[in-house]
Image (cartoon, helix red, strand yellow):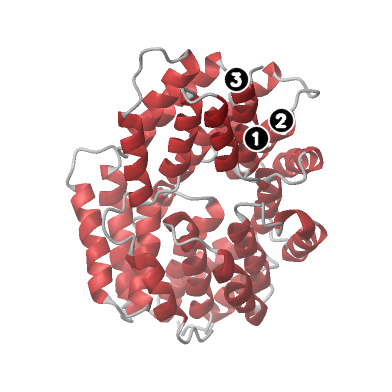
């Protein structure tokens, strides 16, 4: 293996673990071989997957300088997928990667990029099948097997196979203790199965791994820990995580900004006083307002603008969403049928038109997955729908929604609150 190839392997490992400095390894690969195209392609993926309009534009510029001639099969497939992803053609980009991975099941970077793009479309569950195709080609003794196993575990969790997901992901965490995906998958399982005490124990036992500065997505893990506190009714502890842990280490890009927005929205619906936090948060979104191209991010940006009382910012985001819905792009149905109705319903909620929020969100609920994100992240919308039904006095609607939540997570303090409040609505 050449020095450049070894540096690429190191970069892929850092990229798929979400641990370490991928950019440093890519720089070393270019130093060893200035013509190393895989270094440029992986750099372009880092920019594209940020879902930040400025970074995505930089990726497109990089790709313009890469010719197809002379590329390996792997490099050619990544280039094709990147050009699609950079233009918002996420389903087509995933299709290219899926076909490539049938021939190259050991391409860890390809697996992660496909999974991340699926996640932006609410299709994380597809990774279960994708990893199931690939794992028999791997040996348990191979380096990075634990990373591949962790992809499978997270896909199983989003598929709803929580028991198997937990077993697989705990095993992967033993193999790759610094890995983001196995720790993240177990965190999701414990959230989805209503075990917040065990969730906090899981976080605390492994704090040395996921609070390490080299752990690149610790903002999202802090968000998960905060959710456990919310589920236990420990709102002050969750708010302290927002102030002391999330904001200090968060980068001002859409994929990370969604975390504090979602947490603060949840807490405020439960009666917490956000104070100046919304006004302080909105400037972090300001640079995202034009050129946004992620329905999931745009929904969260709209919510932050609404809570901060900045209708101009909200209208800027909503206008951009409507422009996206008027194109011939692959995400048009998502914008038209899901993202725009959610953003408009959230405005109703903030304005105190709770009946309008209910009527806006109920038709979206069956297709909510299309907004993107994980089951836990999308629960923010169902949470808001339930609260809106309660506040509008729609007893049967509110009680029905609370019944659903309580059935699946009967120990949740939040769900008990929803149910008790809904029951108290006069008949």
Crowd band around label 1 with a 10 angstrom C-alpha radius: few (<14), some (14–19), many (20+): many
Label 2 vs label 3: CA separation? 13 Å
- Residue 346 lies, in percent from the top left, at 34, 69
Give the number of marks.
3
In which image quadrant can residue 95 be found? top left
Badge 1 element? helix
Left or right: 100 as drawn, with respect to 365: right
Q: Which numbered disc covers residue 105?
A: 3
Q: What is the spatial separation of the Cα atoms under label 2 and label 1, in whole angstroms?
A: 7 Å
Q: Is residue 298 above or below residue 326?
A: below
* Residue 174 rendering spot, x and y as whole percentages: 81, 41
**At 31% from the left edge and 63% from the top edge, which residue is drawn?**
343
Q: Earlier in the sequence, mark 3 or mark 1?
A: 1
Q: Position of residue 214 (x, y in %)?
A: 67, 52
- The one nearer the camera, 91 or 178, is 178
Q: Secondary structure at mark 3?
A: loop
Per the image, the residue denoted by label 1 is: 13
Q: Which residue was labeled with disc 2?
A: 144
């Amino acid at each position: 293996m050449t020095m450049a190839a070894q540096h690429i392997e190191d970069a892929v490992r850092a990229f798929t673990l979400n641990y370490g400095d991928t950019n440093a390894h890519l720089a070393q690969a270019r130093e060893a071989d200035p013509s190393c195209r895989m270094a440029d392609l992986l750099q372009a993926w880092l920019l594209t997957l940020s879902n930040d309009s400025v970074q995505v534009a930089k990726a497109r510029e990089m790709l313009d300088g890469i010719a197809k001639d002379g590329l390996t099969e792997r490099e050619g497939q990544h280039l094709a997928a990147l050009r699609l992803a950079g233009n918002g053609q996420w389903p087509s980009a995933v299709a290219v990667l899926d076909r490539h991975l049938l021939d190259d099941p050991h391409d860890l970077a390809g697996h992660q990029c496909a999974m991340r793009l699926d996640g932006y479309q609410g299709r994380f569950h597809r990774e279960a099948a994708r990893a199931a195709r690939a794992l028999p080609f791997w040996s348990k003794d191979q380096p990075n097997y634990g990373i591949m196993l962790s992809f499978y575990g997270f896909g199983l969790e989003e598929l709803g196979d929580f028991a198997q997901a937990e077993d697989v992901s705990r095993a992967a965490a033993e193999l790759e203790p610094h890995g983001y995906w196995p720790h993240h998958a177990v965190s999701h399982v414990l959230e989805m199965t209503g075990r917040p005490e065990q969730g906090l124990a899981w976080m605390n036992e492994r704090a040395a791994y996921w609070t390490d500065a080299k752990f690149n997505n610790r903002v999202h893990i802090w968000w998960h820990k905060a959710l456990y506190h919310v589920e236990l009714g420990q709102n002050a502890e969750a708010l302290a995580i927002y102030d002391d842990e999330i904001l200090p280490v968060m980068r001002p890009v859409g994929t990370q900004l969604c975390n504090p927005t979602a947490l603060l929205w949840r807490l405020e619906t439960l009666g917490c006083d956000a104070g100046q936090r919304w006004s302080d948060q909105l400037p972090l979104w300001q640079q995202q307002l034009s050129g946004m191209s992620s329905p999931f991010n745009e929904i969260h940006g709209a919510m932050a603008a609404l809570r901060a009382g900045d209708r101009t910012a909200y209208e800027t985001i909503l206008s951009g969403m409507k422009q996206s819905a008027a194109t011939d792009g692959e995400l048009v149905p998502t914008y038209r049928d899901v993202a725009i109705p959610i953003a408009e319903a959230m405005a109703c909620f903030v304005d105190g038109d709770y009946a309008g929020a209910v009527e806006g969100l109920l038709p979206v609920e069956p297709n909510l997955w299309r907004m993107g994100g994980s089951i836990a992240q999308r629960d923010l919308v169902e949470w808001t729908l339930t609260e809106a039904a309660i506040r509008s006095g729609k007893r049967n609607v509110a009680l029905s929604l609370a019944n659903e939540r309580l059935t699946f997570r009967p120990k949740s303090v939040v769900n008990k609150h929803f149910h008790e409040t809904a029951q108290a609505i006069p008949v």
